[in-house]
């Protein structure tokens, strides 16, 4: 008798070991009886056929698209049918299979959003706040989100005049804090560095914060941090911006500006 691996044994009938708990689950190939295969159940050798259950793709357990075979105990399994669209497979010890399909909850990937601005946007001769074309995310009723907007900004030509002001549009009734960090107003023409300005707002998302801009061949970096505590109205949190001083030299929020937002409650 020769041992091929941890559970498969091979030899003639006379060499076959007694079935016992020590070799329960082992397979034995009987070489002098047409290489039949038997399996130990811990007390006796029983006939075993690898193909007894049929091919996986045509097994009778499958009834519909998305069916899963899930273990329910030692050497037992049960079919789990697919859940509704948008649900996710979730561990639940109260279920027979230990699994269930359920709606995503706090902490799932759906509660984290990243948006990248794919093209530059220009505002000319206007101090009226307008919605950014790309930088926004949805927020549900009674949800709490933290958000960061990172903006790469310039002017069309080398001018220190128009600058930029930014704010957030949030659903009615939402409260929270907003703060901005970036170049101070009065950045000289042609400059790519200067004083840094930091300003915060409490429960005043629509009150704009202004920053200095030029076109020196370098984009000025502006970062907006916010905590939004929503009330009963679902909607969008949208970056708004305009020129700080109306001017024919356009203010630009460049491509690859982005936002990251995470639901925390």
Image (cartoon, rainbow, N blue to C red):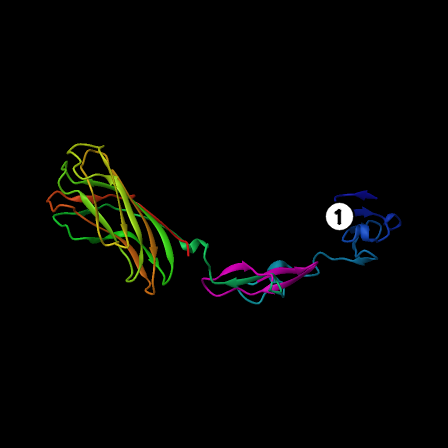
* Residue at x 45% of width, y 62% of height: 86
Q: Is residue 65 left or right of residue 261?
A: right
Q: Looking at the picture, how far across and down is residue 44, in whole percent?
A: 83, 57
Q: Residues within 10 Å of mark 1 (few under 14, many from 20)?
A: few
Mark 1 element type: loop
**What is the total number of numbered labels drawn onto the structure image?**
1
Up the image or down, 182 lies above or below 77; here it is: above
Q: Any magenta on residue 9?
A: no
Which quarter of the figure has residue 64? bottom right
Which quarter of the figure has residue 204? bottom left
Which range is magenta? 68-93
Q: Is residue 245 left or right of residue 219?
A: left
Q: Looking at the picture, how far across and down is residue 254, in whole percent?
A: 24, 43
Examine the rendering and report whether any part of residue 27 can be seen: yes
Up the image or down, 115 lies above or below 160; here it is: below
Of residue 178 and residue 50, the one placed in the foreground of this image is 178
Q: Looking at the picture, how far across and down is residue 127, in whole percent?
A: 14, 50
Q: Looking at the picture, how far across and down is residue 253, in whole percent?
A: 23, 45
Which quarter of the figure has residue 154? top left
Of residue 19 and residue 260, the one placed in the foreground of this image is 260
Furthest residue in direction bottom, as rendered: 63
Residue that carries the numbered disc 1 in the rendered image: 7
Q: Quadrant of the N terminus?
A: top right
Furthest residue in direction front, as rendered: 202
* Residue at x 25% of width, y 40% of height: 182
Up the image or down, 5 lies above or below 217; here it is: below
Q: Any magenta on residue 73?
A: yes
Q: Quadrant of the C terminus?
A: bottom left
Of residue 127 and residue 30, the one placed in the foreground of this image is 127
Q: Is residue 42 left or right of residue 200?
A: right
Furthest residue in direction left, as rendered: 248
């Amino acid at each position: 008798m020769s041992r091929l691996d941890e559970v498969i044994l091979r030899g003639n009938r006379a060499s076959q070991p007694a079935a016992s708990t020590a070799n329960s689950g082992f397979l034995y190939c009987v070489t002098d009886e047409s290489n039949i295969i038997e399996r130990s159940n811990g007390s006796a050798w029983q006939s075993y056929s690898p193909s007894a259950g049929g091919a996986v793709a045509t097994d009778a357990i499958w009834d519909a698209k998305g069916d899963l075979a899930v273990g329910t105990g030692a050497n037992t399994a049960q079919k789990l049918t697919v859940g509704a669209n948008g649900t996710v497979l979730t561990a639940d010890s109260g279920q027979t299979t230990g699994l269930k399909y359920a709606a995503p909850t706090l902490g799932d990937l759906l509660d984290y959003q990243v948006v990248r601005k794919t093209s530059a946007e220009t505002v000319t001769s206007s101090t009226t706040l307008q919605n950014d074309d790309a930088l926004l995310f949805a927020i549900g009723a009674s949800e709490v989100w933290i958000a960061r907007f990172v903006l790469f900004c310039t002017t069309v030509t080398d001018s220190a005049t128009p600058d930029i002001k930014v704010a957030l549009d949030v659903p009615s009734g939402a409260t929270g804090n907003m703060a901005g960090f970036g170049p101070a107003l009065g950045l000289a023409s042609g400059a790519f560095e200067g004083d840094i300005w930091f300003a915060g707002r409490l429960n005043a998302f629509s009150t704009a914060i202004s920053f200095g801009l030029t076109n020196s061949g370098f984009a000025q970096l502006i970062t907006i941090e916010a905590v939004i505590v929503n009330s009963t109205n679902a909607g969008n949190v949208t970056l708004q911006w305009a020129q700080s001083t109306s001017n024919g030299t356009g203010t630009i929020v460049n491509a690859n500006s982005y936002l990251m937002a995470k639901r925390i409650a």
